[in-house]
Amino acid sequence: MQAPIKWLKEYVEFSQTPEVLAEMLTMAGIPVEGISYLGQDIEKIVTGKIIEVEKHPNATKLSICKLDVGTEVLIIVTGANNIAVGNIVPVALVGAKLPSGLEIKASELRGVMSYGMLCSTAELNIDSKLLSAKEKEGIYILSEDTAVGVDIKEALGMDDVVLEFELTANRADCFSVIGLAREVAVLTGGTLKKPMIHLHETAEEKSVSLVKVSVEETSLCSRFAARVLQDVKVGPSPKWLKHRLQAVGMRSINNIVDVTNYVMLEMGQPMHAYDYNLVSKHSLTVRKAQAGEKITTLDGVKRELTSDMLVIADQVQAVGIAGVMGGLATEVTNNTQNVILEAASFNGVSIRRTSKALGLRSEASGRFERGVDTVNSIRALDRAAKLLEDMGACKVCPGIVDSYPNMVLPRQVSFIPQKVNDYLGTDISKGEMLNILRSLEFEIDTHSEGDKVVVNVPTWRNDVQYQPDICEEIARIYGYNKIPTTTPGGNILRGGQEYTQSIVDVIKTILTGAGLDEIISLSFTHPQVLDKLNIADDHVLHRAIRVLNPITDDFPILRTTLLGGVLEAIVRNLSKKNDDIKIYELGAVYLPEELPLHSLPKEPLLLCGALVGKRNELAWNQGKDNVDFYDAKGIVEVLLTGLGIHDYHVAAGDHMSLHPGKTAVFSRDGKVLATVGELHPKVADQFDIHRKVYIFEVDIEAVVDCVNLLAKYEPLPKFPAIQRDIAVVLPLAISAEQVKEAIITSGGPLLSDVRLFDVYVGEQVADGSKSLAFSLIYRDKMRTLTDEEIDVHYRNTIEHIEKTLAAKIRS
């Protein structure tokens, strides 16, 4: 937001310099980022009238001009070819300084003395974006009514200082010159003088009989109002209006459009002007766009709209994107005879989404996003009509057509002065607090009782809702520098990391040591990802929380599983020819107890990892085998061992995203700790993965409950162990874990370890059977064992296996 000092002084008198005023505003929470002196580095340049032009006798491309500069007539030689007798132009006198640093001197050009220079807009350092194509070419030709001999800074409105504000989004009221003037008046003790508006409304027909307005989407548009202007004379704006718009970086277009821009800057209310005769049936409606509906905006770009975008439409088509930009079809041109002036109040979130989706931002959209004063719409219409009426540019039709479905009333906020002082650490009297609030145009409610004070907040201050907001208003006007510095009180607690996070750090260290890389994916996902994971529609993981304002349409819900993000990371890596992948992610998922939400969801920590490609990096001394199920299972075993978890069971299991028959579940005391398996072929196809992927998932909360990081010390054995091997043939349905448990059950007290070292299915084994070979380790800590006593336990084990598992000992 930019505000010229001269413009501010139209509404409030103050004597402070721009620098002092900027400091005062910044300290009051209205930060000034910069101060621009428009006519800086321009000296001794005045307006001059060309009274004679003749060709240079010694140069075909030069001309000799006589110019009246008010105090004298000068001879100036120029190469410009766009000048003529009677033109009024900027003249740099001898001794003048230009913004480029050039200093003008009297000089002889091909035998003729020249006492100055005619200036172009570039030489005056005028931003080309503020000029028409004609004004950019050659010498700057000023309007015919420009006085002669006047300092060019005064003639072009460049004798001004502009404050550049970097406002926070909550101070929507300060995105207007009057809003800033209100703050200046409070800080300097001045009086705010708002523009007087008294319309003559000389047209015969009433607005209500000429135009209709309506609002279909009342939740997105709280007010939509219009005036009708007849006998419109579209043309250039007065110089004061042009200069004022140029001072804030806005190009003059024509008097109608310029007035709407001026009122938007002055009062903070965006407006739009429609050619009355081009609006079908002279009816405007605020509605949602139809899917695929198209509109060509004022910038000449044809845009396709979506069904969640708000538009203003006549009876045939959309004629504007609500709150963002008008349509080219109803643009005001030099042929326009009648105009509909419109002012509205739109939902800021809707405007921001539309603006972002279209990649189209405007001064209007920026204000609607922050919020405009709905009550102010009618006054803004009157102000624009009054300016045009005073210019003689139109006749104003009596009355306003107003659709006001959601009436806005001043909000009431209560506070207790003593609590304000306690909150701020000040000793401000109640009377001073009330004076500060009155100066900000807050009304003190007469029904305040006891220590409580009730105030009516102005409708333009949507940011003030609670007592802390009142504290802020009082503090910033009272002066932050007046608030004494105090040391905060309270108990000092020693910081520390919670137990679960410490375990998480250990888990990450173990996995990194196992050769895995950590990834971090977004906490958002799409329902289609859950479908790809083969998760049934009625499964609890499909009960996901929808995001009210998703960052993109691809991420409308919070994730309920980590597997989708891990697989998407694999897809990205494979597409980049990174074929050997070992990754994991440790993070939270979001599981609501019910939908819609009535309480915060559960956020359990989960671990999900994936292996793809070669087991080892490519090297001459390494094998070229691919990872398999046992690599993923081994990582989980290493992890559990590293956390001191040993007494767990591994059994075949099921998982909707993993291959049936190639999935194992780690459990302890009936609680699932981890699941390992090969990715289901259907899921792999859905993600367009044409490789075998091995997945492991770990429930961190379940694991944390079993962790034992304080391992018990055991001395190295002093006595040798005895090893016996046993190979058994048994049905395929019986797992190795069942055999291992049978061996442990029957092995006796001397059995210290059991390991599976061979699995065989082939010609020497009957169909439907398999051979499993185990190594049994027997040891006594106090003595050396004999073969005879081990044989007893070994035979018991063989008999137990044959009896309970229908196994045959393989010799």
Image (cartoon, rainbow, N blue to C red):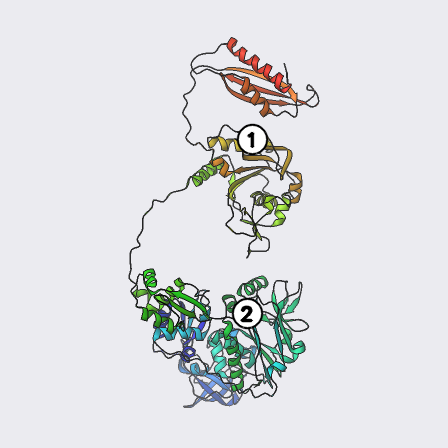
Disc 2 residue type (three-letter):
Asn
User: What is the x, y in percent for residue 184?
Assistant: 38, 74
Task: Work out whether 634 lies above or below 683.
Answer: above
User: Which SS class for mark 1?
Assistant: loop
Dot 1 crowding, Cα within 10 Å, few <14, some 14–19, many 20+:
few
The reply to whether residue 137 is visible in this rendering is: no
User: What is the x, y in percent for residue 87?
Assistant: 51, 87
* Residue 347 or residue 156, whichever sits in front: 347
User: What is the x, y in percent for residue 350?
Assistant: 56, 64
User: What is the x, y in percent for residue 553?
Assistant: 59, 55
Identify the mark at residue 406; answer none if there is no mark. 2
Task: Work out whether 220 lies above or below 487.
Answer: below
Task: Work out whether 805 lies above or below 19.
Answer: above
Dot 2 crowding, Cα within 10 Å, few <14, some 14–19, many 20+:
few
Is residue 730 left or right of 467 when viewed as pictured?
Answer: right
Q: Residue furthest top?
A: 788
* Residue 589 or residue 554, whichever sits in front: 589
Disc 1 residue type (three-letter):
Gln
Q: Quadrant of the C terminus?
A: top right
Label whose residue precedes the other's in the sequence (1 or 2)? 2
Question: Quadrant of the rendered structure where residue 24 is?
Answer: bottom left
User: Which SS class for mark 2?
Assistant: loop
Task: Work out whether 699 lies above or below 206.
Answer: above
Residue lying at 31% horizontally and 54% vertically, measured from the top left: 488
Which residue is disc 1 drawn over? Answer: 622
* Residue 153 or residue 744, whichever sits in front: 744
